[in-house]
Image (cartoon, rainbow, N blue to C red):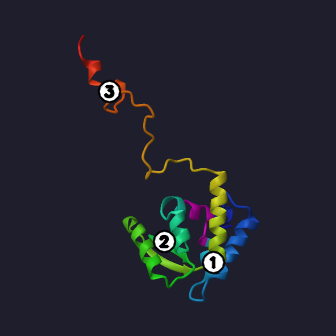
């Protein structure tokens, strides 16, 4: 049994349906059976959370399938879309990943992103988003906007 068959968040029927939809979009230029064993839906969601934002996946109709040997295998509804390919390439360039596109169907793209949204709603992210600013103090007590604990008056002698 391959590790991809042990996806923790998907029941076997859901996983099989999504993989069948991805397989239907494949071309004869590569062996889907080998790729199907490498696709881990948990990893796809981690890639959407960490590398390729949901909004980019939705707008450009792409899915990060898996990473192998510094290559991001990217499912694309329109593999000939140069703008999408270039945008994704720029996003992942700081990771020193190269990009390999794989054709997928629109149905597969929609099903995976719907499953991702349903999963995200049930299991909110536990780690903070490094791109968001930290929560700031709600109450600022002096006219300079600083906390009273850092006020220079606190350190003055009476």
Identify the residue shown where x is 64% and y is 51%.
123
Spatial CA distance of label 3 from label 1 is 56 Å
Q: Is residue 48 above or below residue 72?
A: above
Identify the residue shown where x is 67% and y is 70%.
111
Q: Outermost residue, bottom direction?
A: 28
What residue sits right under mark 3 in the picture? 150
Quadrant of the rendered structure where residue 112 is? bottom right
What residue sits right under mark 2 in the picture? 72
Spatial CA distance of label 1 from label 2 is 20 Å
Tell me, yes or no, whether the two marked residues, 1 and 2, touch with CB atoms within 8 Å: no
Q: Is residue 148 above or below residue 138?
A: above
Identify the residue shown where x is 38% and y is 27%.
141
Q: Is residue 81 left or right of residue 150?
A: right
Residue 48 is situated, as x and y percent measured from the top left of the image, at 54, 63
The tag earlier along the polypeptide, 3 or 1, is 1
Residue range in magenta is 38-46
């Amino acid at each position: 049994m391959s590790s991809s068959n042990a996806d923790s968040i998907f029941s076997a029927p859901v996983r099989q349906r999504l993989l069948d939809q991805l397989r239907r979009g494949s071309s004869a230029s590569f062996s889907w059976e080998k790729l199907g064993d490498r696709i881990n839906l948990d990893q796809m969601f981690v890639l959407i959370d960490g590398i390729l934002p949901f909004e980019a996946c939705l707008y450009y109709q792409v899915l990060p399938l898996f990473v192998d040997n510094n290559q991001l295998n990217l499912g694309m509804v329109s593999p000939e879309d140069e703008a999408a390919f270039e945008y994704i390439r720029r996003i992942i360039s700081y990771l020193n990943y190269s990009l390999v596109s794989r054709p997928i169907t629109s149905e597969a793209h929609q099903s995976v992103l719907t499953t991702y949204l349903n999963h995200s709603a049930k299991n909110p992210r536990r780690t903070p988003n490094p791109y968001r600013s930290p929560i700031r103090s709600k109450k600022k007590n002096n006219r300079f906007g600083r906390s009273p604990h850092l006020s220079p008056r606190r350190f003055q002698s009476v």
